[in-house]
Image: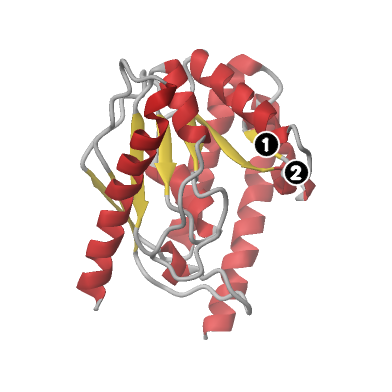
């Protein structure tokens, strides 16, 4: 049954995107239309989770202002995290992710047009993506990032140390950090072979923002540690409840 459920999830995921892509393609052609293309991603995510029977339960301890700019930081244990963040956070944001996505038909085109790519094989890619992210924040658009730098945890829900990028850009542009705890995506779609979907309600927490006003680059480490602690404390609380 689990294999059949996984096959259904994969087929539905692809078919749904193929149906919506022509509309998204049109709105990706002009900068002023891109917020609509982003909205189509949200619709795609919502329809996907409805279609596979997974409820999305978000504890919104903070409701981000759609007119404000933020750096959203979340833990990253599953490839499902990307789709999950698309429905959890409703603001218009650019996602910072690996350039490998560009090789995926249709999805790669959207990602290149709408988000910020990091090519880890190129020595200057990190500096380029950081600069582009800072320009994005300066334009008034939020950034979404997994500060672990990828799926690196070997024992979820224990995170690995965060990288500096998210906190450097937030301080430089003096925008708040919004921590997000993704509580159980690694149980729904574990990062291991064979790939299998498991049915669980998807649960997440949007935490109150951390103000960066007045901070300097000397505060990056402190901001990084505070964000890590907020996300991790929620994950550890969830682990104790599950035990």
Identify the image quadrant of residue 132.
top right
First-in-chain label (2 vs 1): 2
User: Can you see residue 23?
Assistant: no
Q: Secondary structure at mark 2?
A: helix
- In the rendered view, tell whether residue 121 sits above or below residue 113: below
| Residue found at the far bottom of this picture | 1
**Residue 238 spot, x, y in % from top left:** 25, 65
Identify the image quadrant of residue 218.
top left
Give the residue at x 73% y 41%.
119
Judged by depth in the image, the label closer to the viewer, 2 or 1, is 1
Give the residue at x 39% y 17%.
174
**Closer to the camera, 87 or 194?**
194
Neighbour tally class for label 1: few under 14, some 14-19, many 20 plus, Cα within 10 Å: many
**Residue 111 spot, x, y in % from top left:** 67, 38
- Its colouring scheme is secondary structure
Q: Which residue is mark 1?
A: 117
**Closer to the camera, 174 or 100?**
174
Give the residue at x 56% y 48%.
149
**Residue 91 spot, x, y in % from top left:** 41, 30
- In the rendered view, tell whether residue 11 sits above or below residue 138: below
**Badges 2 and 1: C-beta atoms under 8 Å apart?**
yes
Name the disc covering residue 102, or none. Answer: 2
- In the rendered view, tell whether residue 155 sits above or below residue 27: below
Give the residue at x 50% y 14%.
138
**Closer to the camera, 147 or 83?**
147
Q: Secondary structure at mark 1?
A: strand
């Amino acid at each position: 049954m689990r294999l059949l459920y996984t096959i259904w999830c994969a087929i539905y995921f692809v078919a749904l995107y193929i149906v919506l892509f022509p509309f998204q393609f049109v709105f990706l052609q002009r900068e002023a239309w891109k917020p609509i293309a982003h909205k189509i991603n949200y619709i795609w995510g919502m329809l996907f989770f409805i279609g596979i029977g997974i409820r999305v339960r978000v504890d919104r301890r903070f409701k981000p202002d759609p007119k404000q700019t933020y750096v959203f930081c979340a833990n990253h244990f599953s490839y499902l995290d990307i789709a999950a963040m698309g429905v959890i956070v409703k603001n218009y944001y650019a996602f910072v992710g690996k350039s490998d996505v560009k090789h995926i038909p249709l999805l790669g085109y959207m990602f290149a047009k709408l988000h910020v790519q990091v090519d880890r094989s190129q020595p200057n890619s990190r500096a380029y993506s950081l600069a582009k992210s800072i320009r994005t924040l300066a334009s008034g658009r939020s950034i979404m990032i997994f500060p672990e730098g990828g799926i690196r945890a070997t024992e979820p829900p224990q995170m690995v140390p965060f990288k500096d990028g998210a906190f450097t850009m937030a301080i430089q542009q003096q925008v708040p950090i919004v921590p997000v705890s993704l509580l159980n995506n690694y149980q729904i779609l574990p990062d291991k072979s064979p790939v299998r979907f498991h049915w669980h309600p998807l649960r997440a927490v949007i935490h109150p923002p951390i103000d960066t006003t007045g901070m300097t680059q000397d505060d990056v480490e402190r901001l990084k540690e505070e964000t890590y602690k907020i996300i991790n404390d929620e994950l550890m609380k969830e682990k104790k409840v599950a035990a």
